[in-house]
Image (tube, helix red, strand yellow):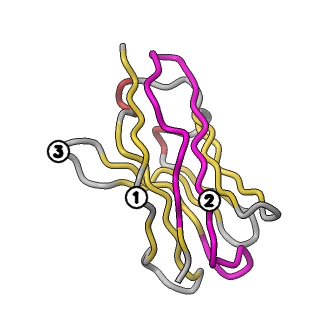
Amino acid sequence: QGQLVESGGGSVETGGSLRLSCATSGYSSSTYCLAWFRQAPGKEREGVAGINANGEDTYRDSVKGRFSIFKDNTKNILYLQMNSLTPEDTAMYYCAARRCYSAEYQYWGQGTQVTVSS
């Protein structure tokens, strides 16, 4: 089993930017789909963005045009570039992996906190 280790979280003001990183090991980019999720206090975990083995990406509506998911297959790092942040983006962010034929994400990182102040 591989590992997922997030980094890059922090505190920013509204309108600021952050880039999250997820170092992946043991997950072949050709067979695994990767994603970013987030969970705010008192709320359910929600998917933010995903990327499949072909590099095709998807986003939840509230982050479209502001967030970008991409990966560096040579370094085995997954990124989430977040721009125009708002307090509603405040949450613990997790990266996750699944075999692309599976519906559920089985592997998770420990999370990195993002806090956006108004």
Q: Which residue is mark 1?
A: 110
Q: How much space separates mark 2 and mark 3, taking CA atoms?
A: 28 Å
Residue at image point 57% right, 31% down: 18
Q: Which residue is mark 2?
A: 23
Q: Which residues are magenta?
A: 4-33
Check if mark 2's residue and mark 3's residue have beta carbons within 8 Å. Answer: no
Res 42 label: 3
Q: Foreground: 28 or 25? A: 25
Mark with earlier residue (3, 1): 3
- Amino acid tagged 1: Gln
Residue at image point 40% right, 24% down: 116
- Amino acid tagged 2: Ala
The x, y position of residue 14, in whole percent, is 45, 16
Asked where in the image residue 37 lies, by quadrant, the reply is: bottom left
Which of the image's four quarters has the C terminus?
top left
- Considering the whole magenta stretch, tell me its main secondary structure: strand
Q: Foreground: 92 or 87? A: 92
